[in-house]
Image (cartoon, grey):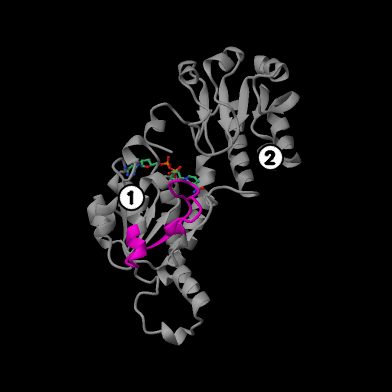
């Protein structure tokens, strides 16, 4: 079996977590590792010596962009296996022009985001974060809320914007709940694929007028900025919860702040614009808004799921099989 020369490119903390002894042993079964095994700065003489020999790179968070100049130092390079989500920060026109294979572990990174979203949707149905904030101010028993109709998940209409890797994985997990209809908006999605995943593809306005919980899974692109603005938020039913694990820029933050400040809407946000919000932000201080610091994606052990996916791709490459998660210039135009 042909064993390509491999170089790992990422920041030190990422290397330590993603490539422990188990992952390095697995890597050694399919590739040759030189010295150094790993680099973050590709412009040192030691890294340049390794780049000259490298046929494959395993990149991750902290990898520098693979510019024309760096690629000129890598004449044998044929494939880049990204051990994290988006490859946007590392790819370049020169990389595409050379026809170098690029794969990503975004599918594996979507898993913890989907898990977080499922939890957020369940809590949104019960308005758990709102009641927790209220009971910190003035403790109350369930008798105070037992007759309310709006604290439940059964039959709730869910709106998913973006039939993405994450959106699809959220829908798989929603099968665990007996929700109501799952409405999906995505200009590129196939209605049959959405139906197969348990949803119904509709226009954004229809989704917004019915969604009791709105969950955003679209990418940050020039065309997706403020997809959810004041007009769109106004379409949501009273008491709806906005869940955002995508990117802060897809929502008009000021408009969301206004709707949440009146108490008409609630929010659970893992991402904001700016991210993080400045100290003293009104949105962050509202009792019906829960904000987490961009933790939905892979952290800790979850990052090893991404290593495993990249190593699977490397193994397929070595065996001459087609990659399962390739990224091209064209697919990147509509994806994260
Ligand atoms: N919170 C986190 O830690 C975290 C981690 C990973 C990803 N993310 C974010 O989650 C989002 C989804 O990531 P992904 O990898 O699942 O995406 P993806 O690349 O798999 O899919 C993007 C999909 O969005 C669809 N789309 C494009 N424009 C759209 C529009 N205007 N309206 C609706 N749909 C549109 C396209 O069909 C595309 O397939 C991205 O914003 C990403 O940055 C966040």
**Is any atom of residue 202 visible in this view?**
no
- Quarter placement of the N terminus: top right
Q: Position of residue 268 (x, y in %)?
A: 44, 59
- Quarter placement of the C terminus: top left
- From this view, report whether residue 328 is shown above or below residue 275: above
Q: CA distance from mark 2 to mark 1?
A: 38 Å
In percent of the image, x 44 and y 27: which residue is there? 328
- Which span is picked out in magenta? 258-284
Report helix, strand or loop for mark 2: helix
Report helix, strand or loop for mark 1: helix
Per the image, the residue denoted by label 2 is: 13
| Residue 285 vs residue 331, the one in the foreground | 285
Q: Is mark 2 within 8 Å of ligand 1?
A: no
**Is any atom of residue 108 visible in this view?**
yes
Which picture quadrant has residue 124? bottom left
Q: Position of residue 62 (x, y in %)?
A: 60, 33
Per the image, the residue denoted by label 1 is: 194
Which picture quadrant has residue 200? bottom left
Q: Please state if 105 lies on the left or on the right of 177 as rendered.
A: right
Q: Position of residue 151 (x, y in %)?
A: 39, 75
- From this view, report whether residue 68 is shown above or below residue 176: above
| Residue 269 vs residue 332, the one in the foreground | 269
In percent of the image, x 66 and y 41: which residue is there? 18
Q: Magenta stretch: residue 157 in it?
A: no
Pointers 2 and 1 in contact (C-beta within 8 Å): no
In percent of the image, x 43 and y 64: which residue is there? 286
Q: Position of residue 81 (x, y in %)?
A: 57, 30
In percent of the image, x 49 and y 36: which residue is there? 86
């Amino acid at each position: 079996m042909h064993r390509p020369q491999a170089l790992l490119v990422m920041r030190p903390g990422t290397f330590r977590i993603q490539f422990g002894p188990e992952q390095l042993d697995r890597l050694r079964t399919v590739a040759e590792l030189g010295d150094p095994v790993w680099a973050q700065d590709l412009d040192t003489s030691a890294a340049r010596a390794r780049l000259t020999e490298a046929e494959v790179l395993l990149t991750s968070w902290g990898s520098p962009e693979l510019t024309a100049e760096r690629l000129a130092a890598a004449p044998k390079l044929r494939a880049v296996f990204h051990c994290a989500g988006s490859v946007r920060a590392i790819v370049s026109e020169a990389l595409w022009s050379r026809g170098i294979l690029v794969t990503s572990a975004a599918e594996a990174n979507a898993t913890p985001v989907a898990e977080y979203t499922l939890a957020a949707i369940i809590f949104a149905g019960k308005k758990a974060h709102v009641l927790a904030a209220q009971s910190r101010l003035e403790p109350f028993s369930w008798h105070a809320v037992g007759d309310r109709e709006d604290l439940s998940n059964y039959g709730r209409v869910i709106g998913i914007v973006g039939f993405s890797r994450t959106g699809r994985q959220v829908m798989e997990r929603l099968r665990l709940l007996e929700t109501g209809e799952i409405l999906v908006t995505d200009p590129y999605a196939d209605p049959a694929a959405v139906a197969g995943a348990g949803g119904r593809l509709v226009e954004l306005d229809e989704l917004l007028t019915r969604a009791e919980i709105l969950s955003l899974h679209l990418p940050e692109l020039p065309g997706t900025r403020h997809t959810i603005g004041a007009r769109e938020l106004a379409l949501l039913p009273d008491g709806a919860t906005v869940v955002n694990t995508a990117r802060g820029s897809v929502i008009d933050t000021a408009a969301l702040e206004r709707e949440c400040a009146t108490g008409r809407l609630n929010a659970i946000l893992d991402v904001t614009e700016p991210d993080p919000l400045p100290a003293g932000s009104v949105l962050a201080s509202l009792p019906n808004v829960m904000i987490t610091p961009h933790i939905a994606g892979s952290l800790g052990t979850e990052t090893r799921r991404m290593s495993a996916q990249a190593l699977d791709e490397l193994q397929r490459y070595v065996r001459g099989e087609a990659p399962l998660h390739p990224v091209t210039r064209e697919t990147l135009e509509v994806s994260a």
